[in-house]
Amino acid sequence: MSTNLLFDAYFTQPAMRAIFSDHGRVQGMLDFEAALARAEARVGVIPANAVAPITAACRAELYDFEALAQAICSAGNSAIPLVKALGKRIAAEDAEAERYVHLGATSQDVMDSGLVLQLRAAIELLESDLARLADALVAQAQAHAGTPMVGRTWLQHATPVTLGMKIAGWLGAMTRHRQRLDELKPRLLCLQFGGASGSLAALGEKAFAVAETLAEELDLQLPEQPWHTQRDRLVEFASLLGLIAGSLGKLGRDLSLLMQTEAGEVFEPSAPGKGGSSTMPHKRNPVGAAVLIGAATRAPGLVSTLFAAMPQEHERSLGLWHAEWESLPELCCLVSGALQQALSLVPGLEVDAERMLANLDLTRGLVLAEAVSIALAQRIGRDAAHHLVEKCCKQAVKEGAHLRVVLGANAEVTAQLNAEELDRLLDPAHYLGQARRWVERTLAEHQELSLRKESR
């Protein structure tokens, strides 16, 4: 998780990297310690006059991160040396207050609750970026709801679709991810506070009152019990991050394929120096899409680490817990970086509608063979129609002729379909099916979610 000056600007978002920086991690743990002191004072576990000296020392900039890093090597986690450093700093100002630092807590309480505070900030960024991306996709889907293009299955030309329908597919995924994020927040954003083995025995009869008050101080949910070795909350979030990365990767993959020289239908926004080659002056590489695809490729490995770390031993784990520490923050940074790239791409997509029309006719009418086959099936039966149109398609390919010409010269076909009917069947604009409806339904779902969020 160290700063990588060469690649961070390309693969991550500065604001997200800041959340999971050393400063962000330490501040999250110190926020827990300050809130613990306030909660215990409110409940009557510690004197009220101990709170101010403790909270005054809970500022990350007061601590030497390099010294903490070295101490972690001996301690086995980041909370132990931080709490020691916190205690020393408080003792230098108020020896009495130092007695009440970290009372009843364990190091995993500090680290997990601090992480949850970081994740809350991360979610705010993700929610904002997902909403902005969704709005940009809405605008593009509306603009191109009726723009016909080739549909491609197994990377081959299939039947006509619209660019708006394709973009609406990207939008629908983002809407579902926003819904999922809403649904998991109450489960994820909860306090970790169990003490040594999860029973909070050190705080006696006031333990539960402290837990309730601490959750209130941190504005976190109070779970049914501590979750030191029940990691499903974090893994659920990691899984969602993997889903978001995958959907962004789908967007990037589609866009990069549409940018291929052989297609040339949709392009990333152009900018001076963007997408060039070190040796080929003509190149226009999909440099933004590459980040989306790269994040989608890396995310599953990080998600799998979180899954692999789930069967943790008894009440506190070794090694499996440690495997989470960098994996989840890195996932957040990866997804956030991919979102930034998507936000830079989608609003300015460059669309070549004429090239799309030309590509629709690249197979000389073959992409509309299904339309003809279905029309004939109503008159001569499905199997007969399929074989007749298939024969005409093979002839068109063999002769290098347009399917319309071959169909018009076939007596079996013209006995059933006149020239006007054939012209209509071979017009892509008349074979777009429910494409526009799919766009409208996707936009309506987006609008419903946005209105629901605004009303809260």
Image: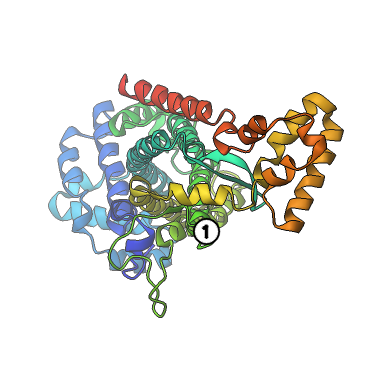
- Left or right of 399? Residue 381 is right
Give the farthest residue toward the left: 93
> Image point 15% across, 49% down: which residue?
94
Instruction: Report the residue that reaches farthest toward the top.
Output: 455
> Relative to residue 376, is residue 425 drawn left or right?
left
Name the one closer to the observer, 147 or 126: 147
Q: Is residue 449 above or below residue 159?
A: above
Instruction: Say above or below: 307 vs 385.
Output: below
Q: Quadrant of the N terminus?
A: bottom left
In the displayed structure image, the side of residue 310 where residue 415 appears, left or right: right
Q: Identify which residue, 331 or 257, lies in the foreground.
A: 257
Kind of residue at disc 1: Arg
Q: Which residue is mark 1?
A: 298
Is residue 197 visible in the rendered image? The answer is no
Of residues 335 and 427, the one drawn nearer to the viewer in this rendering? 427
The crowding category of the residue bearing disc 1, from other C-alpha atoms within 10 Å (few below 14, some 14 to 19, many at least 20), is some
Q: Position of residue 319 (x, y in %)?
A: 55, 58
Which residue extends farthest right?
384
Q: Position of residue 445 (x, y in %)?
A: 46, 25
